[in-house]
Image (cartoon, rainbow, N blue to C red):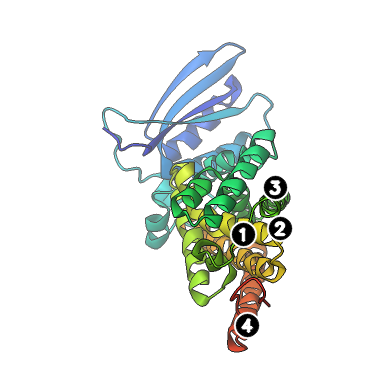
Amino acid sequence: MGGIMSERIVEIFLPEISVGDVRRVIARHCRRFWQETVPGDKEKFSCLVQHRGVEGFLADLDEAFGGLPDFTVLVTRLEAVIPAMPEATLAFERGRASERPPTRIERFFSRDRISTDELLDDIDEKIHVTPNFLLMLSLSAIIAALGMRSGQTAVVIGAMVIAPLLGPVMGMALAATLGDARLARRSVSTIAIGASLAFVTSFVVGLLTSIDPSVPELHARTIVQPADIILALACGAAGVLAFSQGASLSLVGVMIAVALVPPLSAAGVLAGSGHAMLAINALFLFAVNLTCVNLAGIVMFLVQGLPPKTWRLTAGVTLIWAGILLLLFALMIGRIGFGIAAMDGLRGF
């Protein structure tokens, strides 16, 4: 019996005339497949493929048959296979026909990752600005703001669980890794709308309630220290690592939201209650966290073996994020060196 999620069934539909060509592609990527005739003078091939071999298989199929109007591929996750599939050594050892074979290190780090197409499909439905997205983000901001106001850590954690920031944040990192401009634009737009909504919603909470900025849950979001950079980098790396293995979106969402939702909500509620300088401090923490999450996300996607469209573009975006982080770090060190810290509601920058 195969391990959970260790195999995929790849169903290929294409004209009968292409049967010989597709058989040659299949022979490089899988050892077990079935062929049947379907209506419309088409042939269907059902192939069992280990998940780490799906990406190269789909790339070869798209290269060979992507221009055919009747060509379709469906990928489905399997819970188990009996008898168990032998370890695939054909395509995974060789890589794509036009590429060098992967090294042992590359095989080791990419062995548990789902395919790029699966990652894109998982993210695509999460980067649309829908009524549900706006409502869930508003509710998570309210819950986080009220939880920090009253010092209830468990309530803040609950806000992280429901915050729908996973899609756009992961989309930004994945777009930078793959060099996908369209995905980047949609992700940036969604995160901008989401962040603005979270701030405005929390601002209203600050207007309507009394706020004590000395409460530890709020106070912690107005101080930026080197440890916060390490935390955000760890959140981004752990989130991508879990996401690239098909982990629960709620689990990944908590990893990412821990670095983004609380400072956003703290900034809004503090601004609404008249503590402008403290709100700026919280926004500074949000900027640091967003930068760290994206930088760590890109690096972890690369470690997981995602193939960039062009290394020059991916390296350039990575260097930009690294430069922004260095600038923010310098500002943080300067503020610490000059003794500028958020002490109470009357002091700030």
The residue tagged 1 is 211
Q: Are marks 4 and 1 in contact (CB under 8 Å)?
A: no
Q: Nearer the viewer, residue 330 or 157?
A: 157
Label ID, residue 190: 3
The residue tagged 4 is 340
Q: Earlier in the sequence, mark 4 or mark 1?
A: 1
Q: CA distance from mark 1 to mark 2?
A: 9 Å
The secondary element bearing badge 2 is classed as helix
Q: Earlier in the sequence, mark 4 or mark 2?
A: 2
Q: Are marks 4 and 3 in contact (CB under 8 Å)?
A: no
Q: Quadrant of residue 259?
A: bottom right
Q: Earlier in the sequence, mark 4 or mark 3?
A: 3
- Quick check: 133 above or below 197? above
Q: CA distance from mark 4 to mark 2?
A: 22 Å
Say what amino acid the circle numbered 3 marks.
Thr
Q: Quadrant of residue 103?
A: bottom left
Q: Are marks 1 and 2 in contact (CB under 8 Å)?
A: yes
Label ID, residue 272: 2
Q: Residues within 10 Å of mark 3 (few under 14, many from 20)?
A: many
